[in-house]
Image: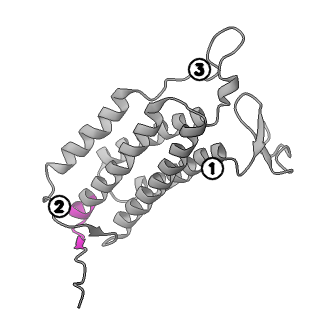
Amino acid sequence: MKIYTKTGDNGTTALFGGTRVKKYHLRIESYGTIDELNSWLGLIRDQEIALPIKETLKLIQSKLFTAGAILATDPDKSILKSGKERLNIQKIGAEDIEFLEKEMDNMDEHLAPMTHFILPGGHTTVSYCHISRTVCRRAERLIAHLHENEPFEDNVLIYINRLSDYLFVLARKLSKDLQAEEIKWIPEKKV
């Protein structure tokens, strides 16, 4: 299989199912942003962090490929003539969302209560985490817009929402693990 096909030279790409759409189509923007997020998570996983976090990130990266595959499937061609689903993979389920929630709860137990917003930064690894969180929020906005116009499984949108929360809590945990200072945002009072 060659990497280059030349079929996209005219500014279109194929969805899973064969439908060709413009490369700036909302569906392409949605799963492209998921791909970008996945790359940032790989960068976090490559840092000097605890092995359990690396393993969790690897699981999340796999789920992001699942989300991308769902988003890349033409909804009008998602069911084959045989009645089977075109996309023959394990979907994102409630248990995947609950997994993120449990991970957050476990990390949160060991963190100081939040009293203020936190400025991103303090350590390169923490900053990567905050960048991932903001890319995740962008993906969520795009996916929410797509879902409104071309509905797909709700769990994809819920998972991405929960993932951005997870990445915020992970940034706080990594700040603690790496002994980085969490800088509170304290608004200046109007004079």
Residue 177 figure quarter: bottom left
Instruction: Name the residue at 54% across, 39% down.
Output: 148
- Which quarter of the figure is the C terminus placed in? bottom left
**Colouring rule applied to residues:** one colour
Residue 19 covered by magenta stretch: no
Q: Nearer the viewer, residue 95 or 47?
A: 95
Question: Residue 29 has which mark?
Answer: 1
Q: What is the crowding at mark 1: few (fewer than 14 residues within 10 Å), some, or many (at least 20)?
A: some
Earlier along the polypeptide chain: callout 3 or callout 2? Answer: 3
Residue found at the far top of this picture: 82
Residue at 66% in and 45% down = 28
Q: Nearer the viewer, residue 7 or 125?
A: 7
State the image coordinates of residue 9 (x, y, percent, origin top left). Answer: 85, 51
Q: Amino acid at mark 3?
A: Asn
Neighbourhood count class around disc 2 (C-alpha, 10 Å): few under 14, some 14–19, many 20 upward: few
The residue indicated by pointer 3 is 88
Disc with the residue nearer the chain's start (2 vs 1): 1
Give the residue pinned by disc 2: 114
Q: Position of residue 18 (x, y in %)?
A: 77, 30
> Measured from the top left, where is residue 4 in percent x and y?
80, 46
Q: Secondary structure at mark 1?
A: helix
Q: Earlier in the sequence, mark 1 or mark 3?
A: 1
Inspect the image, locate mark 2, and give the three-letter code of the amino acid beneath it.
Met
Q: Is residue 97 above or below residue 52?
A: above
Distance of label 1 from label 3 (alpha carbons): 23 Å
Quadrant assignment, res 171 = bottom left
Q: Determine if the magenta segment contains residue 177.
A: yes
Residue at image location 25% in from the left, 45% down from the top: 104
Give the residues drawn in magenta, as a range: 174-184
- Tell which tag, 1 or 3, sits nearer the viewer: 1
Q: Secondary structure at mark 3?
A: loop
